[in-house]
């Protein structure tokens, strides 16, 4: 179902059902540096490899937690189906986010998502997802989150 749009009736059946898993995504130093520039967070643990090797338990630079969190959208798009007739999808927020382990520069991550809540409204569908970001070769995930999204439906495609 990766990236596929499915009818709302079929989407409802995903509630408390299968887990959706994205492809692996490499988080390299270039990505970390661009995020540091965009957020003006140039803490040495993210941008100074030599210092991070000497002064941290990570053995090198690590991704910002918020960089990893921001990649949920990309990972989700890769893994989860959408609702047919969606005009646009937006983030609604998080009930809970935990940063459990670091993502080292050069590591590969992927997302795992399970639909645990579905609320239908006149022109939208609100969903809640148990989400986690795992790091290849690590037991503990980088992030766990209860993520809420909103699919805004195209009014022209809704039944009268």
Image: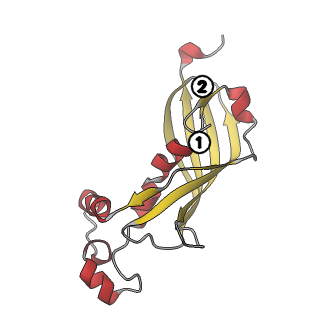
Q: Residue furthest bottom?
A: 54
Dot 1: what SS?
loop
On screen, residue 11 above or below 27:
above
Reading the image, the residue beneath label 1 is 80
On screen, residue 111 above or below 125:
below
The image shows residue 124 at horizontal and vertical percentages of 59, 30
Dot 2: what SS?
loop
On screen, residue 69 above or below 4:
below
Residue at 34% over, 79% down: 60
Figure disc tally? 2
Left or right: residue 11 versus residue 46 is: right
Residue at 26% over, 84% down: 51
Left or right: residue 46 versus residue 2 is: left
User: Which one is in front in this view, the residue at disc 1 or the one at disc 2?
Assistant: 1
Q: Is residue 97 visible?
A: no
Depth check: give the residue in front, 28 or 125: 28
The image shows residue 131 at horizontal and vertical percentages of 60, 55
Q: Residues within 10 Å of mark 1 (few under 14, many from 20)?
A: many
The image shows residue 156 at horizontal and vertical percentages of 54, 13
Quadrant that contains the C terminus: top right
Q: Quadrant of residue 58?
A: bottom left
Reading the image, the residue beneath label 2 is 84
């Amino acid at each position: 179902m990766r990236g596929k749009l499915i009818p709302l009736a079929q989407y409802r059946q995903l509630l408390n059902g299968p887990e959706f898993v994205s492809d692996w995504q490499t988080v390299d130093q270039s990505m970390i540096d661009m995020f540091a520039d965009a957020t003006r967070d140039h803490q040495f643990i993210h941008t100074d490899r030599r210092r991070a090797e000497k002064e941290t338990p990570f053995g090198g630079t690590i991704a910002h937690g918020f960089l990893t969190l921001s990649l949920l959208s990309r990972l989700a798009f890769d893994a989860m189906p959408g609702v047919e007739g969606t005009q646009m999808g937006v983030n609604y927020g998080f009930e809970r986010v935990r940063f459990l382990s670091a993502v080292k520069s050069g590591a590969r991550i992927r997302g795992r998502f399970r639909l645990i809540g579905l609320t239908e409204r006149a022109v939208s569908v609100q969903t809640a997802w148990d989400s986690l970001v795992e790091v290849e070769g690590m037991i503990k995930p980088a992030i766990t989150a209860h993520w809420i999204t909103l699919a805004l439906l195209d009014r022209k495609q809704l039944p009268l």
